[in-house]
Image (tube, grey):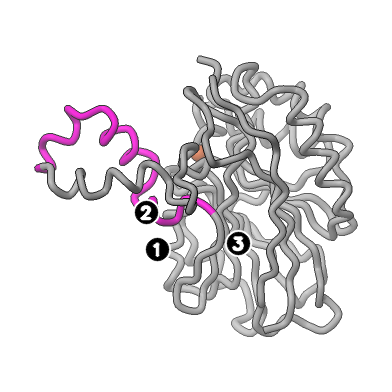
């Protein structure tokens, strides 16, 4: 179903302090796109073109994409990558995959090959050093896949090296507290799609109701059931959060599910890294 309520694209500019960031990387700009859901219903050609243009106008050092390129059928990837091809970043474009990119058995391969075909590097439990050896970019397998095993990935990064983590589902932040994650970039929640003016996502408002309802009843209340399925931590639905020494930023995504967005516009994020 097509969304009814739509809002114009919003560029969010954030500055994040990174411990041990080398002076040469002071001011590095990372632009993030997430949750495109390019399926003919949830993302218009116009919004996609605008998002690509906004990304390039930022003249980023790095572009990162944090998953859910499609919704179920991976075939639209072939057309999506034609639209993403104009993206330009000085040090390259890196991507992690989301749960929707694994919908069918063949999905992961089709999505990965399409992105790789236009020069976007897909990081699935993998590390890249596009800005030199002093800043790692880590892409993790999706949280709901059977391959979300961050331990062996983090073990490969020298402890003094700061790192950016691409992890589609922000719930992974809870697990990642065991490791150094200077800045985790996520999506997946679409910001909750409907928010109060103070940014509180609608699903978070259901929390008192959820807690007051016996667990065995949750599956009979569609709203509770569906919201609980998306994430456990609705408090991490959008924006910047600090968890101990780790930092987390959640992009509200570009694609929109029915009934639409209210107080939660689609987002391009431009993150400027500065030394802590
Ligand atoms: Fe997702």
Q: Is residue 208 above or below residue 85?
A: below
Gap in Å between the C-alphas at discs 3 and 2? 18 Å
Report the residue marked by disc 2: 233
Q: Which residue is mark 1?
A: 174
The quadrant holding residue 224 is top left
Where is residue 60? Give x, y as percent. 84, 56
- Residue 21 vertical placement versus 243 (above, below): below
| Residue 128 rendering spot, x and y as whole percentages | 73, 61
Quadrant (top left, top right, bottom left, bottom right) of the C terminus: bottom right
Mark 3 and mark 2 residues within 8 Å of each other at the beta carbon: no
Residue visible at 75% across and 54% down in the picture: 31
The residues tagged by marks 2 and 1 sit, at their Cα atoms, a distance apart of 9 Å
> On the rendered structure, is 101 left or right of 86?
left
Q: CA distance from mark 3 to mark 1?
A: 13 Å
Residue 221 magenta-highlighted: yes
Range drawn in magenta: 214-238
Q: Is residue 40 left or right of residue 229?
A: right
Question: In the image, is the residue at mark 1 within 8 Å of ligand 1 by its beta carbon?
Answer: no
Lower sequence index among marks 3 and 2: 3
What residue would you read off at disc 3?
165
């Amino acid at each position: 179903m097509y969304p009814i309520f739509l809002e114009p694209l919003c560029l969010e500019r954030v500055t994040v302090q990174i411990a041990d960031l080398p002076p040469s990387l002071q001011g590095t700009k990372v632009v993030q796109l997430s949750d495109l859901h390019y399926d003919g219903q949830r993302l218009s050609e116009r919004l996609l073109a605008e998002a690509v243009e906004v990304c390039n106008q930022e003249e980023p050092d790095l572009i990162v994409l944090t998953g859910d390129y499609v919704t179920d059928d991976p075939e639209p990837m072939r057309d999506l990558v034609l639209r993403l091809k104009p993206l330009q970043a000085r040090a390259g474009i890196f991507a992690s995959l989301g749960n929707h990119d694994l919908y069918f058995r063949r999905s992961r391969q089709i999505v990965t090959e399409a992105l790789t075909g236009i020069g976007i590097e897909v990081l699935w439990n993998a590390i890249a050093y596009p800005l030199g050896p002093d800043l790692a970019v880590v892409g993790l397998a999706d949280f709901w896949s059977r391959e979300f095993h961050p331990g062996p990935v983090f073990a490969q990064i020298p402890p003094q090296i700061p790192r950016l983590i691409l992890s589609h589902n922000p719930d992974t932040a809870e697990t990642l507290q065991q490791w150094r994650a200077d800045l985790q970039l996520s999506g997946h929640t679409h910001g909750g799609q409907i928010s109060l003016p103070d940014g509180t996502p609608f699903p978070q408002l259901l929390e008192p109701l959820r807690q007051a309802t016996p667990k065995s009843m949750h599956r009979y209340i569609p709203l509770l059931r569906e919201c609980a399925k998306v994430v456990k931590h609705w408090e991490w639905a959008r924006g910047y959060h600090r968890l101990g020494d780790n930092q987390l930023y959640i992009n509200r995504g570009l694609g929109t599910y029915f009934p639409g967005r209210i107080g939660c516009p689609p987002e391009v994020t431009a993150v400027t890294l500065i030394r802590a």
